[in-house]
Image (cartoon, rainbow, N blue to C red):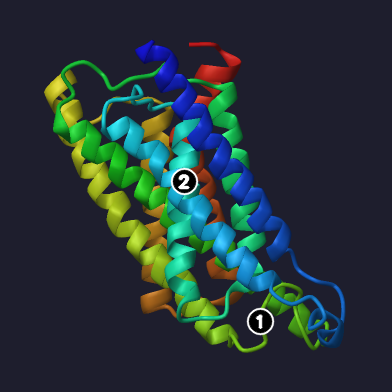
């Protein structure tokens, strides 16, 4: 009876969050109409804001189930993606209080809904290594936090790249980007998120070294996850140094950001996807 209750609660919470995210994405989708016509659809932005907040709370409740011991913790790729997009939504929510970022809302909500859907198809089957201790939990939590921050930075970077292209093509407005948000402000937000993500990623690697030393007697296991993780850290470090010392901006900085983020994605989510879905391990 307890197991059935747990599973029913899990399905209810995730299903509610999934539905609310889809509703928020629908109401937040960019309008291709003129501003006059947009004004004839009252309440859509308010509805999107409300549904996104409710979805985020419902999504958070799924993690509460894990913390309360009502659902087994899972360190597979699907829960990692789910937690990442929950954090991306949290970052967006805070930023949207100060900056006009409505254009990102539809995409964030849609991606969060998809990440929840994946947790249903790929249920928990990967737990923490035996004897890893608190260091592993801190490594995983800080790493996922870095995923969320870099994910938000990448979304900002995509908007920044689109805005730069629009300027070169002499377009007056970029779809989904508020004209009240200066490009310089968007650029600063992008790399502030990247800097904070780098701090979390660095801390995550330190705790990875600690629990690896505890389990295996050496700081790192030489595998694809370590290679991609360290490579992404080096690229992020080069990006931040390049911006700070050499003044990197525009396409060059974005290329470094996108490449480093792709390597970071491959280091954990990508490796877990291959092991869990393709190799069935």
Residue hosting label 1: 178
269 or 124, which is in the foreground? 124
Residue 92, compared with residue 74, is above or below; it is: below
Closer to us: 252 or 277: 277
For label 2, the crowd category at 10 Å Cα-Cα, with few meaning under 14, some 14 to 19 and many 20 or more, is: many
**Residue nearest the observer in this picture, 8 or 262:** 8
Residue 104 in sight here: no
Q: Position of residue 70 (x, y in %)?
A: 32, 25
From the viewer's perspective, is 101 left or right of 221? Answer: right
Image coords of residue 170 (percent x, y): 82, 87
Q: Nearer the viewer, residue 47 or 164?
A: 47
Residue at the spot 56% in from the left edge and 25% down from the top edge:
120
Figure quadrant of residue 245: bottom left
The x, y position of residue 16, in whole percent, is 56, 41
Q: State the separation of the CA atoms marked 2 and 1.
A: 28 Å
In the displayed structure, 109 sits above or below 118; it is below
- Which marked residue is nearer to the observer: mark 2 or mark 1? 2
Place of residue 143 in the rendered image (x, y in percent of width and height, measured from the top left): 34, 44
Q: Residue at x 36, y 58 (%)?
A: 197
Q: Quadrant of residue 228?
A: top left
When asked about the image quadrant of residue 193, the answer is: bottom left
| Label of residue 58 in the image | 2
Quadrant where the image shows the N terminus? top left
């Amino acid at each position: 009876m307890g197991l059935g209750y747990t599973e029913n609660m899990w399905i209810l919470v995730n299903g509610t969050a999934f539905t609310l995210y889809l509703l928020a994405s629908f109401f937040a989708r960019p309008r291709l109409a003129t501003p006059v016509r947009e004004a004839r659809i009252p309440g859509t932005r308010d509805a999107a804001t409300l549904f996104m907040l409710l979805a985020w709370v419902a999504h958070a409740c799924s993690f509460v189930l894990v913390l309360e011991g009502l659902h087994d913790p899972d360190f597979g790729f699907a829960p990692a993606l789910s937690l990442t997009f929950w954090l991306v939504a949290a970052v967006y929510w805070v930023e949207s209080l100060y900056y006009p970022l409505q254009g990102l809302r539809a995409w964030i909500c849609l991606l969060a809904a998809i990440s929840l859907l994946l947790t249903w198809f790929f249920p928990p089957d990967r737990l923490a290594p035996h004897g890893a201790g608190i260091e592993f939990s801190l490594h995983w939590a800080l790493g996922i936090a870095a995923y969320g921050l870099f994910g938000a930075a990448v979304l900002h970077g995509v908007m920044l790249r689109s805005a730069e292209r629009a300027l070169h093509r002499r377009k007056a407005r970029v779809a989904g980007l508020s004209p009240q948000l200066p490009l310089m402000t968007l650029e600063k937000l992008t790399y502030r998120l990247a800097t904070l993500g780098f701090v979390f990623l660095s801390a995550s690697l330190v705790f990875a070294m600690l629990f690896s030393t505890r389990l295996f007697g050496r700081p790192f296991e030489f595998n694809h996850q370590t290679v991609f993780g360290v490579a992404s850290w080096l690229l992020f470090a080069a990006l931040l140094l390049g911006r700070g010392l050499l003044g990197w901006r525009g396409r060059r900085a974005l290329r470094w950001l996108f490449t480093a983020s792709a390597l970071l994605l491959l280091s954990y989510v990508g490796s877990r996807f291959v092991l869990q879905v393709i190799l069935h391990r």
